[in-house]
Image: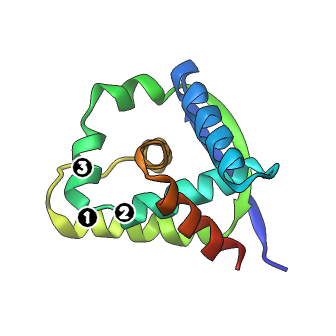
Amino acid sequence: MESSRTYKLMLSDKGIDLFLDCHCRLSHLVRDLIPYGMTLTVAVKLLEGLDTCEIVAEAETRRLTQSYGTQPHFVGSSTKLTEVIARIKKKINNSNEIGVIPSIGKLYVLALFSLEAAEDGQIMAIYQRLIG
């Protein structure tokens, strides 16, 4: 059995709407009721696949500021999610494309943006890999 932990998402009202829209979309695609953590995991895996310049460009948008918030929301997911976020941070840091690496909380919001923008086939491919 895979170990899990709780992840803190700092979301504004717009951020909550974004998360719920992404969760609903993924649930519709897989035709099943899924945990919130699966939505976060799929989103983070999609973010990992983006080019660093795409991540950096999105990190500097007003949209991120509007979706990131002060209210904590907790989602349970695999401990492996921490490793993926660490790889993303390292990728951004090694790129020298940005002065300040976004916080982990902001990376989660950027991940949701990547899920929102992804094609259905991309989302399903990641989901299928995650469930084995």
Q: Which residue is mark 2?
A: 89
Indicate the amino acid at tag 1. Asn
Q: Is residue 6 visible?
A: no
Indicate the amino acid at tag 2. Lys
Foreground mark, 1 or 3?
3
Quadrant for the N terminus, please. Answer: bottom right
Q: Secondary structure at mark 1?
A: helix
Q: Is residue 103 left or right of residue 41?
A: left
Q: Nearer the viewer, residue 93 or 43?
A: 43
Q: Against 61, is 83 above or below?
A: below
Q: Against 111, is 17 above or below?
A: above
Q: Residues within 10 Å of mark 3 (few under 14, many from 20)?
A: some
| Residue shown at 61% from the left, 52% from the top | 40
Q: CA distance from mark 1 to mark 3?
A: 11 Å
Task: Examine the image and state in which quarter residue 28 appears.
Answer: top right
Q: Residue 46 location, x and y as percent? A: 46, 60
Q: Residue 35 location, x and y as percent? A: 78, 51
